[in-house]
Amino acid sequence: MKWVKSHKWEASIILTIIVLVVVITVIINVQHYQEQKKLNHYKSEIAHTPVMGSKNAEDTISVYGDFNCPYCRDFELDTLTILKESYVDTDKAKIHFINVGLSGDDSLYKSVASYSLYQYDKDKYWTFHRQLFENQPKENQYKTTINNTSNQNYISKKEAESVINHAKEKKQVNQTLKDAGVSSKDIKRIKKDIDNHKSNAWKYAMEDRKLANKHQIKHVPTVYINGEKIPSSNDLSVYREYLGR
């Protein structure tokens, strides 16, 4: 009788352990599924943005920046250079750039020009991108003449014309395109896209502003790794902690 009771007790313990293992496994799988779903959704949000590196890279770094932000210039020329060498060139990570376009009409104008170029010549894009930061003006930037908190990924003809008319660096942008080696044919196509408020270039530039508003980006540069906002954009130890998990 004692033997039977003992074995029943052991069987009960084993059954309890099995149930716990199954429950824990289910919880872990559900959490993993939810995390993967969240990551896939975030990747779909930034799918339109310029990407540096292999599409098969394990980790995704997304940088919210502004072509006319001096802090973003420092990040681009220092931190991003190191990240490219350490992670992008080794196929460990890819980098997406989201231009919030909030530091004046020139910033938004540059965003539209860069998106247009990215459609026609992805190889030239990153040269142009870097030169925009290198040639960044030193004078103060102001808010755009359109709604900064828009949740729309389109712009009216009147708003687009306002941005174009108030942008002071149009000649500099055109010269930077030439310096980046962009063909005269593509420069004409870029000009046409800028003048057309219904172009994909405008659509994507406005989509970036919408994303910045959705994720409540209060300052730039702000960096996400695999959909998770990191505490510091310039601390390299943070990248080592988050990448390759």
Image (cartoon, rainbow, N blue to C red):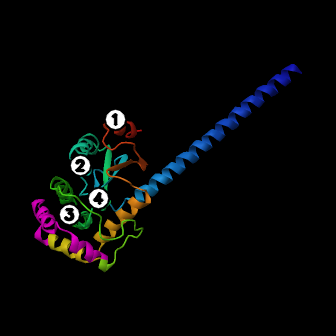
Q: Nearer the viewer, residue 194 or 120?
A: 194
Asked if residue 62 can be seen in this view, the reply is: yes
Instruction: Tell me the SS state at disc 3.
Output: loop
Earlier residue among tags 2 and 4: 4
Looking at marks 3 and 4 on the same chain, the residue that comes earlier in the sequence is marked by 4
Q: Answer yes or no: is residue 61 visible.
A: no
Queried whether the magenta region covers residue 168, the answer comes back as yes
Task: Residue type at mark 1: give it.
Answer: Ser
| Alpha carbons under labels 2 and 4: distance apart | 15 Å
Q: Which residues are magenta?
A: 159-185
Cα gap from disc 2 to disc 3, whole angstroms: 21 Å
Residue 205: percent from the left, percent from the top? 31, 66
Could you give the CA–CA distance between mark 3 and mark 1, rounded to whole angstroms? 34 Å
Q: Which mark is residue 121?
A: 3
Residue 76 badge? 2
Crowding at mark 2 (Cα within 10 Å: few <14, some 14-19, many 20+): many
- Say whether disc 2 or disc 1 marks the residue closer to the N-terminus: 2
Residue 178: x, y in percent? Answer: 10, 64
Residue position for label 4: 50
The answer to if 214 sits in the magenta stretch is no
Q: Amino acid at mark 3?
A: Asp
- Whether tag 3 and tag 4 are in contact, CB under 8 A, the answer is no
Amino acid at pointer 2: Glu
The location of residue 238, given as percent across then percent down, is: 36, 38
Residue pointed to by mark 1: 237
Whether tag 3 and tag 1 are in contact, CB under 8 A, the answer is no
Does residue 120 lie above or below 192 as drawn?
A: above
The quarter of the image holding the C terminus is top left
Q: Earlier in the sequence, mark 3 or mark 1?
A: 3
